[in-house]
Structure formats: structure tokens, C-alpha cells
Amino acid sequence: SQTIHQWPATLVQPVGSPLSLECTVEGTSNPNLYWYRQAAGRGLQLLFYSVGIGQISSEVPQNLSASRPQDRQFILSSKKLLLSDSGFYLCAWTSLAKNIQYFGAGTRLSVL
Amino acid sequence: QKEVEQNSGPLSVPEGAIASLNCTYSDRVSQSFFWYRQYSGKSPELIMSIYSNGDKEDGRFTAQLNKASQYVSLLIRDSQPSDSATYLCAVAEERTGGFKTIFGAGTRLFVKA
């Protein structure tokens, strides 16, 4: 069965510091991968999605970037965090057979 | 602007009642429709998927889709306190190489014991 791992679960970072969040998927090959952000009490905002290694589509221009160095690895990065980057970051992969998205456990990021 | 609209709630129902959650979407080319449940501080989990007009039942949950009206709903029968959560409506449309899913902001449901 497919499993998605996301870490860390919680992160507290100072403004201006770098960020690296990692997501890996097991049990499937060539998945479509996604990064979402959810602000407190809000819906899911799609940040990036990837249909293959090295292929990244950005949905929202901001100081975040994403990379996909391996088939089942998706990384979200920032060189300098802003206060507005605080939120709940979710990685997801899609079952193309039924277009269903499955989410990792999420990373709660607090930028102080 | 392609959107998925939900009433933010909160929707409060007594235990054992039917909870009715509604969602409208703006893009007629949308092909797949989902309801996710999200407990506070947790990631969303799939409750129901529906791909064609009509009703789809799974246990206490029934999803209803009306593509002509661009409307999808979720009924929860015999609501339980454990159903208290935020319910996200999601709509997927085909893009090059895969599908893009757009989520509504969610409806908060409270089931009172």
C-alpha cells in the first residue's frame, strides 16, 4: 500500500531563516506530488505541484520554492522566511486512477 | 476565477440527526468531486468521492452530485460527536500530465451529544 511521509511535524523558525521540508512517498511510482499551505481557520492553498522529476509548477508567486530530485521525493524550501509563511504545510500525492489526493501528516510551521 | 464555495458554518446538529453540507463549484469542466474530513490539527482524510450525477452512499455518508447545477453535497446520517470536524469539498479538473484539485475553505460541523 502507498504511504506518504512528511517531516518534521512541528517547526519553529525565526524570521529570515531558511526552510526545508521534505516529503517522500512509498508504494507507488511516478506520483503527482503537491505542496499545500493552510493558514489557521482557512482552506488549502496549492503552492506547487509536480508531475515528474525536475518538473515543478508554481501556483502562487512567493518566497518559497520546490524541488523534486527523485521520483518519490518532494522538497519545499525558502531562503528567508517571512512571518506570513507561518501555517500548516501539507504534502499530497494523487492516485491518477481516481484523482484522489492522499495527504501526509503535515508540518506546522511557526515563524517568529 | 475557478472556485469552490462552501458555507463556513459552524453547522451544529444534535446527535442522531442528519447533517447536510453543501458545496458549489464554478468550473463546468470539473470531473471529479470529493469530500474530505479534517480534524483540528490533523491532515485531511477522504470521506467520499463521486464522479457522476446522482447519489453515492457509503455507510452513514451519502454524496450527491448535480453537474448541471454545479452542486455537490454530503449527508451524514445518525450524526455522532466523533463526526465533529471541518469538511472540505474538493473538485478536480484535468490538466496536462495530471489533475489539479481545488479545495473549498471547509464547513465546520459540531455534533452535540
Image: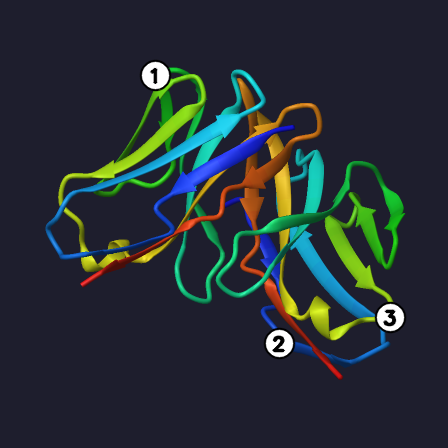
> Label 3 neighbourhood size at 10 Å, few (<14), some (14-19), many (20+)?
some
- Marks 2 & 3 on one chain: yes
Q: Residue B17's image quarter?
A: bottom right
Q: Which mark is residue A54?
A: 1
The mark lying in front, picked from 3 and 1, is: 3
Q: Nearer the viewer, residue B24 or B109?
A: B109
The mark lying in front, picked from 1 and 2, is: 1
Q: Measured along the vertical axis of the image, is residue B112 above or below residue A99?
A: below
Q: CA distance from mark 1 to mark 2?
A: 42 Å
Residue type at mark 3: give it. Asp
Q: Are the residues flagged by discs 3 and 1 in contact, CB closer than 8 Å?
A: no
Residue type at mark 1: give it. Gly
N-term mark: 2 or 3: 2
The mark lying in front, picked from 2 and 3, is: 3
Applied colour scheme: rainbow
Q: Which element type, helix, strand or loop, lies under badge 1? A: loop
Residue A79, given in percent of the width and then of the height, sits at 14, 39
Question: Which residue in the protein does label 3 denote?
Answer: B78
Q: Chain of mark 2?
A: B
**Residue beneath the point at 82% across and 62% down:** B75
* Left or right of residue B62: residue B97: left
Residue type at mark 2: give it. Pro
Q: CA distance from mark 3 to mark 1?
A: 48 Å
Q: CA distance from mark 2 to mark 3?
A: 18 Å
Residue A103, given in percent of the width and then of the height, sits at 54, 42
Question: Which residue in the protein does label 2 denote?
Answer: B10
